[in-house]
Image (cartoon, helix red, strand yellow):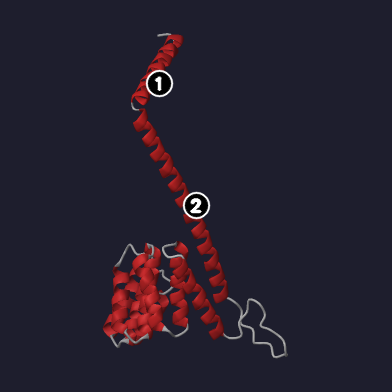
């Protein structure tokens, strides 16, 4: 078949297809109009949702940036000269900075629940509360992230939760979390680091055998780890 004939055949087939579609549309004009209307409404709704979601994420991210800046702000002693004020972006004490950071981080989580920024803020809130020696509150913040965050943040939050439990002298509960994390080969956290935390928790709880087993796993399974030398020294001390 010549190229020209093939081209003409394709044109005829296309014309027939267009004609058939036109006939169907004419017969079902009401249905087509309804479907088209639904498609338009859905498109507008999705477009609006995407805009709101993006705008919301941007707002949450900006607020998280402010909260993080507060948590990292420099400490500058309060001015002693009459009429002087605290330098903008600084705090007179660590306690004042911590209280401001906790308030700002909590605001992100409460104002933009469900966003990535809220997850990050709640995790940072747990860390800040832990530093402020409020382990029970820190545990609650970490637990929120552990059940609602991504796999990476959930694992980090579980680790933070264990640290908060250790600060409350709840070693057995902390050891359970460390043990679960160390057993998860698909976890986002480095197993050797978790094992070191597990070993130290076991030491604090007076469980020398468990501590020795954890340190030995670091030495045997992760010989090139940055923790290996420390684990060897700890094993020697436990003998």
Occupied quadrant, residue 223: bottom left
Kindly identify which residue carries mark 1.
Answer: 18
Q: In this view, does 78 lie above or below 213?
A: below
Could you tell which of marks 2 and 1 lies nearer the N-terminus? 1
Query: Which residue is under mark 2?
Result: 51
Residue 110: image location, x then y, percent? 44, 70
Rendered view: 39 above or below 116: above
Label 2 residue SS: helix
**In the image, residue 114 lies at what x, y percent?**
41, 63
Where on the picture, by quarter, is residue 100? bottom right
Who's the residue at 42% across and 84% down the image? Answer: 134
User: Which of 40/147 is in front?
Assistant: 40
Mark 2 vs mark 1, CA separation in Å: 36 Å
Q: Residue at x 64, y 83 (%)?
A: 76
Label 2, residues with CA under 10 Å away: few <14, some 14-19, many ≥20: few
From what the image shows, is residue 88 above or below residue 221?
A: below
Q: Residue at x 61, y 79 (%)?
A: 74
Task: For the residues labelled 2 and 1, say whether their Cβ atoms are less than 8 Å apart.
Answer: no
**Residue at x-position 40% and y-position 83%:** 135
Provide residue 24's location: percent of width, then percent of height. Answer: 34, 24
Q: Can residue 152 be seen in this view?
A: yes
* Residue 158 vs residue 28, the one in the foreground: 28
Quadrant of residue 207 in the image? Answer: bottom left
Q: Where does the C terminus fall, quadrant-wise? A: bottom left
């Amino acid at each position: 078949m010549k190229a020209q004939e093939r081209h003409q055949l394709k044109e005829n087939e296309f014309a027939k297809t267009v004609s058939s579609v036109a006939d169907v549309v004419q017969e079902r004009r009401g249905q087509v109009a309804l479907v088209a209307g639904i498609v338009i409404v859905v498109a507008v709704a999705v477009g609006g949702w995407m805009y709101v979601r993006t705008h919301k994420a941007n707002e949450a991210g900006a607020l998280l940036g402010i909260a993080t800046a507060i948590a990292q702000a420099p400490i500058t002693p309060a001015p002693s000269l009459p009429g002087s004020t605290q330098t903008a972006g600084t705090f007179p004490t660590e306690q004042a900075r911590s209280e401001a950071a906790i308030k700002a981080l909590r605001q992100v989580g409460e104002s933009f629940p469900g966003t990535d920024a809220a997850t990050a803020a709640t995790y940072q809130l747990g860390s800040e509360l832990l530093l402020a020696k409020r382990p029970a509150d820190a545990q609650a913040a970490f637990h929120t992230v552990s059940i609602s965050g991504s796999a990476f943040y959930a694992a980090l939050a579980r680790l933070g939760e264990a640290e908060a439990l250790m600060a409350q002298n709840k070693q057995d509960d902390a050891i359970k979390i460390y043990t679960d994390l160390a057993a998860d080969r698909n976890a986002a956290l480095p197993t050797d680091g978790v094992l070191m935390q597990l070993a130290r928790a076991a030491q604090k709880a007076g469980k020398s055998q468990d501590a020795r087993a954890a340190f030995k796993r670091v030495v045997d399974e992760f010989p090139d780890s940055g923790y290996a030398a420390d684990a060897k020294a700890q094993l020697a001390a436990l003998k």
